[in-house]
Amino acid sequence: MRPQQAAYPATRLRRTRQSAGIRALVRENTLELGDLIWPVFVRSGEGIEEPVASMPGVFRRSVDKVVEAAREAADLGIGAMCIFPYTGIEDRTEDCAGAWDPENNANRAIRAIREAVPEMVIMTDVALDTYNINGHDGFVEDGIIVNDRTVEALVKMSLAQAEAGANIIGPSDMMDGRVGAIRAGLEAAGHSDVMIMSYSAKYASAFYGPFRDAVGASGALTGDKKTYQMDYANSDEALRLIERDLREGADMVMVKPGLPYLDICHRVKTTFGAPTFAYQVSGEYSMIKAAAQNGWIDEERVMMESLMGFKRAGCDGVLTYFAPQVARLMAQGR
Ligand SMILES: NCc1[nH]cc(CCC(=O)O)c1CC(=O)O
């Protein structure tokens, strides 16, 4: 589409910017609470809300506190949450068996939220890094990340989450063939309504640093994730990954990180027209928080502007740690 317009002064583009009411009439995009998914961190214990040092305003909560937070979030109008477990180094193993334990902290949280806040949409994270002794998303044999044995484990992990009551399974591991295998596993187990949001175009990014602190992976991780997460110099490859995952049965796809990858979001949405999400990751959140704490930027305005950027790029929704803050701002009618 090419806009047709008369020459100045017949066209003065400032006319449609002259007042708040006019600007509202011609506004092209909107941001609603229904677009947001709130990532939360769950840990063991009771009555615990432990701040994550590198993510101001973000906590690791015990299951009872996650349920409380879910209730408050729902009352504020947040419709979806994504559950990430924190695992200390003492509970990490080479065989990652905690990942498919029905009683792990993530699955206990899913069950408790499903019970206490039945309307909440619950998304999960599927990858071995939060249970792995070495912090990697797949099994490591002789220093190599092994694909197919990892995929079998990811299917078991997904099934345990679906059993616990998850609505959306979120494979974030970047192994090949996992979406198809998880879909087949869900169908065979009678979970045909459980959805998959694939972290399809997930880049090997330094913006995940604070998250790895939050889940206890920073100390554990040996090396980097470049043999499975994407090279940030590539974008055609992102489209191939998205197409592959849609063909394997992904209901929704995700680009991650967010702000430095809006070009990818736009290409994905215009190419495939599938439900497209971006993850505004921990490092993006912490950068905004840190600059605001220094008094260098206006936190609320930068938060809203960054989130609208995702909508403008074509995203249907965003995973963001800002979700409760956005909800409180909107509750004040701002
Ligand atoms: N599979 C793990 C996973 N799932 C979500 C994030 C990052 C989220 C964030 O930074 O906010 C990561 C980290 C990683 O791949 O190392």
Image (spheres, grey):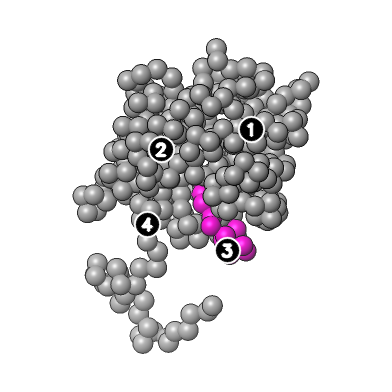
**Mark 1 to mark 4 CA distance (whole Å):** 36 Å
Nearest to the observer: residue 237 or residue 76: 76
**Residue that badge 1 annotates:** 156
Q: Is residue 170 above or below residue 140?
A: below
Nearest to the observer: residue 156 or residue 57: 156
The mark tally for this picture is: 4
Q: Which amino acid does label 1 sit on?
A: Lys
Contact between marks 3 and 1 (CB within 8 A): the answer is no
Relative to residue 162, is residue 79 drawn left or right? left
**Mark 4 to mark 2 CA distance (whole Å):** 26 Å
Q: What residue type is labelled 4?
A: Leu
As helix, strand or loop, the secondary structure at mark 4 comes to: loop
Q: Nearer the N terminus, badge 4 or badge 2?
A: 4
Name the residue at 30% across, 72% down.
Answer: 25
Q: In this view, does 150 lie above or below 333?
A: above
Q: x and y percent of residue 270 in the render?
A: 58, 64
Q: In front: mark 4 or mark 2?
A: 2
Residue 274 counted in the magenta span: yes
Q: Report the disc number at residue 114.
A: 2
Q: x and y percent of residue 50 in the render?
A: 37, 22
**Mark 3 to mark 4 CA distance (whole Å):** 19 Å
Q: Is residue 200 above or below residue 138?
A: below
**Mark 1 to mark 2 CA distance (whole Å):** 20 Å
**Residue that badge 3 annotates:** 273
Badge 3 density bin: few <14, some 14–19, many ≥20, Cα 10 Å: few
Q: In this orientation, does residue 292 appear? A: no
As helix, strand or loop, the secondary structure at mark 3 comes to: loop
Q: What residue type is labelled 2?
A: Arg
**Mark 3 to mark 1 CA distance (whole Å):** 30 Å
Q: In this orientation, does residue 92 appear? A: yes
Residue 155 counted in the magenta span: no
